[in-house]
Amino acid sequence: MTQSPAIVFAPEKVSIEKALSVAWQCTKREFVPLLVVMLISWAIPLFVSLFFILVGFAIPKDQSILQICYGLITTLVSGLIGAVMELGMVNVQLKVLDGGSAKVSDLFSANQFFVKYALGSFSYNVLAFWGYIFLFIPGIIVNCFMQFYSYFIVDKALGPIESLRASWIASRGARINILLMVLIFHALRTVGTVLLFIGLIPAQMIISLATAELYRQLVKNTSPEDFVGIEGLRYSLPTQEDYDRGHVIQNDQL
């Protein structure tokens, strides 16, 4: 009597090697378009800030109330523009990861998610702030394991709270690897900075794309049952049966 091979789940939820490899390949393929998009995403907030500074010189120094109001307005506008650029870069990273080309227009093609992103970013930063206040470690936990909220907003159109919950759930079972990736990212930034900042741009490209690839792996390798309660994911995930069929290996394949 032939015994049917037992089914076991594949042990690795995310692969650091694959994330870095995919990021490197995408960086080589799209280096120039990514460079153009990144420089523009940095230049727009910079030019806006310089413009506000120049206009600020025209405000009389004895008009303290006017200066305060102007400072509040410029801070708000600069924050909004920065958020638009950050949201756009997430959109660009996902498109490049899916085989597309980086385009400047993609910086502004995800603006329909701006309110969700702004609220999600605010919630994320508040949680991280209080986490650092209370013994520091909770802040690191929030930063590492809820950092994928922006990808859930752009890729799955989740709301601000749902995206944070989804990121937290998806990180389960992969948190050691995520922490290792964060350390690797810090090392890459350090190396890029040491190389007279010339290496910082490609390092940032690799880090951004590796983070997006890590998000893709987490979504792919998280059971739909774990995402129960995240209403926005109900129709964008495979069925549990399809997931189980694609995430098991037979003993005779080991």
Image: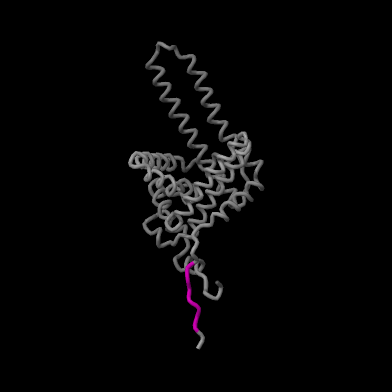
Q: Residue at x 50, y 52 (%)?
A: 215
Q: Residue 222: x percent and y percent?
A: 45, 59
Q: Is residue 149 above or below residue 247?
A: above
Left or right of residue 20, residue 127 in this image: left
Is residue 13 on the magenta stretch?
no
Residues in magenta, as a range: 3-9
Q: With respect to residue 243, does 60 lie above or below?
A: above
* Residue 102, percent from left and from top: 61, 44
Closest to the observer, 221 or 80? 221
Residue 92 location, quadrant: top right
Closest to the observer, 1 or 39: 1
Residue extending furthest toward the bottom: 1
Q: Nearer the viewer, residue 204 or 58?
A: 204
Image check: 169 left or right of 45?
left
Residue 34 in the image: state x and y as whole percent.
62, 41
141, above or below 18, in the image: above
**Residue 132 quadrant:** top left
